[in-house]
Image (cartoon, rainbow, N blue to C red):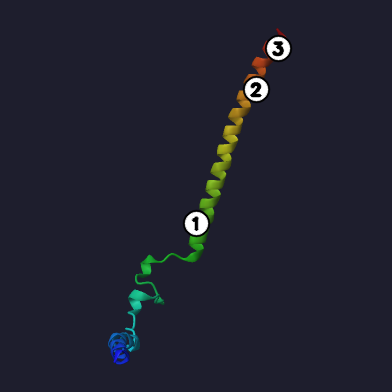
Amino acid sequence: MTRIAALLLLTVLAGPAVALAQTPPKPPAAAQDEFVPINAPVNPSDTMPAPMLVGTAYAFIWIVLFGYLWSIRSRLATVEKEMAAIDRRVGKDSRR
């Protein structure tokens, strides 16, 4: 009698789980759930050719590089002037 009750309980509880596992999943909406390639831009005026982007990127990098080098050169020149001034002061003090 307990075996029949356990089998009946197992059938009642496992029935909906088996039914849910056998239902096919809903197909996803293509535009919302995955990448959908397009062949042309939505608005043709929104495009920029690749060579223009590459040229702009290289120009930006070169400008930043030269600006950084100029900054280092000017700071180094300031340090050299200060070192020369210190050297002159120390040179005068050591002669006395």
Which residue is at 58% across, 28% downward? 78
Q: Is residue 48 left or right of residue 62?
A: left
Q: Position of residue 1 (x, y in %)?
A: 29, 92
Can you tell which of label 2 and label 1 is closer to the viewer?
2
Query: Which numbered disc, 2 or 1, marks the residue that appears first in the sequence?
Result: 1
Q: Residues within 10 Å of mark 1 (few under 14, many from 20)?
A: few
Q: Is 50 rendered above or below residue 85?
A: below
Mark 2 is on which residue type? Ala
**Is 72 in front, or is 29?**
29
Decide which of tag 3 and tag 1 comes sooner along the chain. 1
Q: What residue did someone put label 1 on?
A: 56
Q: Which amino acid type corresponds to the residue marked 3 in the rendered image?
A: Ser
Tell us which disc is closer to us: 3 or 1: 3
> Which residue: 69% across, 15% down?
91
The crowding category of the residue bearing disc 2, from other C-alpha atoms within 10 Å (few below 14, some 14 to 19, many at least 20), is few
- Residue assigned mark 3: 94
* Residue holding disc 2: 84
Pick the residue in front: 5 or 26.
Answer: 5
For the residues carrying marks 3 and 2, which lies nearer the camera in this image?
3
Q: CA distance from mark 3 to mark 1?
A: 57 Å
Mark 3 surroundings: few (<14), some (14-19) or many (≥20) residues within 10 A: few
Give the image quarter of residue 80: top right
x and y percentages locating residue 48 in the rendered image: 43, 64
Give the secondary structure at mark 2.
helix
Q: Position of residue 92 (x, y in %)?
A: 68, 12
Rendering quarter of residue 37? bottom left
